Image: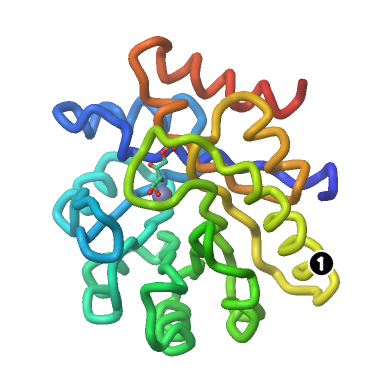
Amino acid sequence: MTSEARILIAPSVLAADFADLGQQVRDVTDAGADLIHVDVMDGRFVPNISFGEVIVDAIRRSTDLPLNIHLMIHNPDDLLPCFMKAKSDQILVHAEACPHLHRTVTKIKEAGHQVGVAINPGTPISALEEVLPLLDIVLVMTVNPGFGGQSFIPEALDKVKRLYRTIQSQGYAAQIEVDGGIKADWTAQDSVQAGATILVAGSAIFNNHESIPDAMKGMRGCLFS
Ligand code: DX5
Ligand code: ZN
């Protein structure tokens, strides 16, 4: 990757204390987050249910940062309007969950949002080939989606590298985002080295052993060490 690329940190509120969600979102905003990553899970596409529109609206009221909304929803088309409320929010859908991926991507773009497509660890980059020129973000899952606190899958690094080369060689605009098991260590460093410019971090930012500002400092600091 180029050394000038700015690395964006997107704390995932899935790991936040939901009894104090508004304050946690404000704290992470004040601590220098670039985006707020919001995991919507439907219990069907992934084996877990997180939250839906009402909570996303509450998160949006707690920060001025763009939301990076990760929809882990089977066939999300009918629900898109629930999540496309602030133009600055980025909407990410899963390639595996969209039977009409091109239509879904186009709908999100036409509504004026940045659009991303996520791929699971078992999904090849080729699944994106036909929509890649349209995308603002490709989200490479570095764990199997559904839960926070899982271990980073190292094989995903090679996928990020290959995707980065494809994007560069074709002159596409998409940024690469990584999600799952990212800590302030080699997982963040190697992901950036491979070409990722957006790092999602849940349990590395919201946890019981360090404050949110310290965790954010650690994450940002590890990228320069
Ligand atoms: C997993 C979610 C992730 C999750 C990451 O399905 O998409 O965004 O919150 O959590 P950590 O950083 O703890 O692996
Ligand atoms: Zn996510």
Residue at position x 57%, y 19% in the image: 217
Q: Residue extending furthest top?
A: 209
**Residue 153 against residue 145 in the figure, above or below:** above
Query: Where does the image place residue 45, in percent across and percent down from the top left?
Result: 29, 65
Residue 152 location, quadrant: top right
Query: Where does the image place residue 47, in percent across and percent down from the top left?
Result: 25, 54
Query: Where does the image place residue 140, in percent across and percent down from the top left?
Result: 56, 57
**Residue 74 against residue 15 in the figure, above or below:** below
Q: Which residue is mark 1?
A: 168
Which amino acid type is marked by label 1?
A: Gln
**Residue 135 against residue 47 in the figure, above or below:** below
Q: Is residue 210 left or right of residue 187?
A: left
Residue at position x 37%, y 73% in the image: 97
- Where, quadrant-wise, is the C terminus in this rendering? top right
Query: Where does the image place residue 183, in percent across and percent down from the top left?
Result: 55, 28
Q: Note whether ligand 2 is within 8 Å of mark 1.
A: no
The colour scheme is: rainbow
Residue at position x 47%, y 25% in the image: 31
Q: Is residue 54 left or right of residue 189?
A: left
- For the residue labelled by badge 1, is the local secondary structure a helix, a strand or a loop? helix
Residue sitting nearer the eye, 98 or 1: 98
Residue sitting nearer the eye, 18 or 190: 190
